[in-house]
Image (cartoon, rainbow, N blue to C red):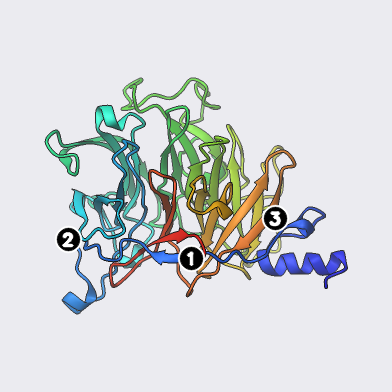
Amino acid sequence: MINSKLAVCLNVLLLTGAWCSASAAEIDTRPLPLAIEVAFPHAKWPLWQSAEETGVIDPLRPILLTHAGDGSNRVFVPSQQGVIYVLPNDQQASTAAVFLDMRSKVAYDDKTNEEGLLGLAFHPKYRENGQFFVYYTNKHKPHQNVIARYRTANDDPNRADPDSEEILLVLDKPFWNHDGGTIVFGPDGYLYVAVGDGGLANDPYDNGQKLSTLLGKILRIDIDKTQDGLAYAIPADNPFAGMQRARGEIWAYGLRNVWRMAFDPRTELLWAGDVGQDVWEEIDLIQRGGNYGWNIREGIHPFVIKGSKRPARDKKPQGMIDPIFEYHHDVGKSITGGFVYRGKQVPELEGAYLYADYVSGKLWALWYDTTAKRVTANREIPLPKSIPVMSFGEDELREAYFTTYSAEGQGVYRIAPAK
């Protein structure tokens, strides 16, 4: 039996990677055994062939699972290679339909595998207007990401109009990696966009801290209006709207490469997993105008460029926002952010933030006390095998899924009650 604070602290550090403190010592780290099942095990994915069929390994890369919020209970699964699939939310579904084929526009290569079709979000009024939005890497211009609007075909709810594309925003980057790519609608009806710092390593152009660039930021735009020649409008209450030498689209900054963010529908908090570089991975609650520190620091620690004995910056700016949780690279090396579970099938997960690590292949449920402002539990959900979790998703009933690449086409999993 552990009977000393030091022992508890060491246990927390080993299991979670968190720095030890009075609150960290009280974190519940007991494993949380639940059922992990292949979702839609019989589904066939048109426009993709398995290695068994072709003799060439070209894994299906489902980058998300989401829904249209239109009461149809369908699920949409975009592949990183550029195809959006739709299928009924039925575990016995045998075939997915092609909702939209974007392969002629989307750049994807295994050697630059942070690019591709990265984000999909349906308009809050999709049932009325048929609009949805995508975030993808442009096949015809290197290192360029595009946010675009599409519309569903008038004669078929399971097919998008491929000719309806309206480009809203173009993001040019100096390097291929750190693309970000999450797009989500907030409770205010605005579109929030996660944009990486531009790539390479160390943020060589200091994009995270520059308000004159959209790189290394969370953006917030109004896609129902236009303004000053833009294909969208900048909400007047954005923190830097109208400020000289700052982009008004910015909602938060100082971020390295947010890989998945999501609003909790109950608390309306915006959760984000920001991928670290050398030592620390972090979970943030995104606030209006918040500076999350990159590349001055990594997690709560001064960022030190390898080979240098000094921090990347000599002066720490005031008011940087700490992550609510971080873990060391002894635990995992690339966070996959998820969402707060509000479904009904797995009551053990109520209110938990689900996240994973792509490199270590581990999955966790984290609980955060918003009043006390501390994490109360970080419980691993044991997987039947190490799975590099690419992304998370939820269906219209808010049940939990996650995705991974698969040479057999079974890359979508769901979390279910223990059996």
Q: Residues within 10 Å of mark 3 (few under 14, many from 20)?
A: few
The percent position of residue 91, horizontal first and vertical second, equals 31, 59
Residue shown at 58% from the left, 36% from the top: 267
Mark 2 closeness class: few <14, some 14–19, many ≥20 residues within 10 Å:
few
Q: Is residue 358 left or right of residue 348?
A: left
Judging from the image, what secondary structure is the residue with disc 1 in?
strand
Identify the residue under disc 1: 35
Looking at the image, which residue is at 35% across and 20% down? 228
Q: Position of residue 224 (x, y in %)?
A: 34, 24
The numbered mark, 2 or 1, whose residue comes first in the sequence reads 1
Distance from Cα at disc 3 to Cα at disc 2: 46 Å
* Placement of 206 over or under 168, stated as above or below: below
| Dot 1 or dot 3, earlier in sequence | 1
Between the C-alphas of marks 1 and 3, the distance is 36 Å
In the rendered structure, the answer to whether residue 262 lies left or right of residue 12 reads left
> Can you say whether 223 is above or below 363 in the image?
above
How far, Cα to Cα, is label 2 from label 1?
31 Å
Residue drawn 51% across and 29% down?
245
- At label 1, the amino acid type is Ala
Assign a secondary structure to mark 3.
strand
Instruction: Report the residue marked by disc 2.
Output: 47
**Between tags 1 and 3, which lies in front?**
1
From the viewer's perspective, is 277 left or right of 62?
right
- Kind of residue at badge 3: His
Quadrant assignment for the N terminus = bottom right
| Residue 211 shows in this picture | no
- Reading the image, the residue beneath label 3 is 301
Horizontal and vertical percent for residue 202? 55, 57
